[in-house]
Each structure stands twice: as C-alpha cells, then as structure tokens.
Image (cartoon, helix red, strand yellow):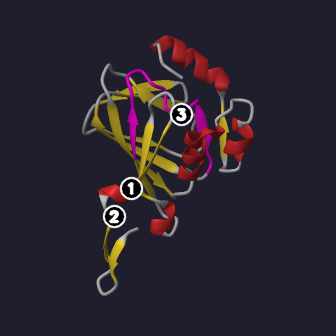
Amino acid sequence: MIQANEGTALSVRRTSEIEATSDLAGRVDRYLIESADSGGLVALLEQILPPRALAAPVHRHSREDEYSVVLEGRLGVFQDDEEVFAAPGDIVFKPRGHWHTFWNAGDGQLRILEVIAPGGIEELFRRLAGGEYDPATLPAMAAQYGAEVDFERTMPLVERHGLVF
C-alpha cells in the first residue's frame, strides 16, 4: 500500500510493498508504478532477465509506447527487422504499432526500467508470469490488450542469438 500524505499528495511505496512476478526461465518483473497509481497514464516496471533470455515473442501493441532504460547489462532490441544494442544509461524507444521484442544480449544479468505509456498492458505480463502462457492461446490473450504476436519472426531471432525462450 502506498503511504500518502493527504495534504501534499506525497506518497511512498516501500520496497517490501512492490509486487514482483517471475517465471520458470528466471525473468522477473517488479511493478514499481502500476497503471492504477497514475490514473492509467503510465506504468513503470523493473525487468530482470538472466543471460541470453528473450523477454517475449516478437509482438506489437496498438495502445502503448515503451521506453527501456538500461540499468545493468546489455540489452538487445529487435524492431521492424532492425536490431540495436544498448548499454547502461542508454534509453531505447519502442513506439506503438511496431513489431518488436528485446532480450538480454550479455552473459550477466540484464536490468531495465520499462516505462509504458499509457499503462495497462502490465496486466498481461502479470497473467503470463502467473502461468497463463501457452503459445496456442497467447494470440487471443494478447488481443485482449490490443497486442499481436508473431512467432514466425521470433524463432529466427532466437536461433541467431542463441536465446532462451
């Protein structure tokens, strides 16, 4: 629960109050600012990926822009058949409507802050980490959040970079 001072609107979410989800591959999402906290304007997640882990299949959103701020490690990003790599301190902009994914392109842990505007799709991340991930049902689930997935583009990327997915 966020501790708020009603007079100044100053609030604090303690580390112990930050929800985190993880999956069997070792990917962790920490929900720092939830969509509900900002009236739907933004969500902020810390995402932690083990070496060579792919975050998600190639996908695109119709509603959200994403900004990835690299805190630790080496981030690989695929967008519309282009690949870039980013280091700590770099920020990668992934606008809505573009096919993209990202992965840990290094041999150590990757930590990024993922800024999502507007918020809301973080609920899909939570559902997937909770065990609802099934390649057969993912397209329909993603569509509920205005997103699409493309497994045909995903597998060559996995093979080219030796990724865990």
Residue lying farthest to the left in this orientation: 89
- Rendered location of residue 84, percent (x, y): 40, 27
Query: Which residue is labeled 3 in the image?
Result: 100
**Is mark 1 in CB contact (under 8 Å) with mark 3?**
no
Amino acid, disc 2: Arg
Q: Which mark is residue 13?
A: 2
- For numbered disc 1, what is the local secondary structure? loop
Whether 160 is among the magenta residues is no
Q: Which mark is residue 124?
A: none
Amino acid, disc 3: His
Quadrant in the picture for residue 88: top left
- For numbered disc 2, what is the local secondary structure? loop
Alpha-carbon neighbours of circle 1 within 10 Å: few (<14), some, or many (≥20)?
Answer: some
Alpha-carbon neighbours of circle 2 within 10 Å: few (<14), some, or many (≥20)?
Answer: few
Q: Quick one: 72 or 84, which is closer to the camera?
A: 72
What's drawn in magenta, residue-wise?
46-62
Q: CA distance from mark 1 to mark 3?
A: 27 Å
Query: Which residue is labeled 1 in the image?
Result: 18
Amino acid, disc 1: Ile
Horizontally, is 143 left or right of 96 in the view? right
Q: Which quadrant, please, contains the N terminus?
A: bottom left
In this rendering, the answer to whether 91 lies above or below 145 is above
Sequence order check, earlier mark of 1 and 3: 1
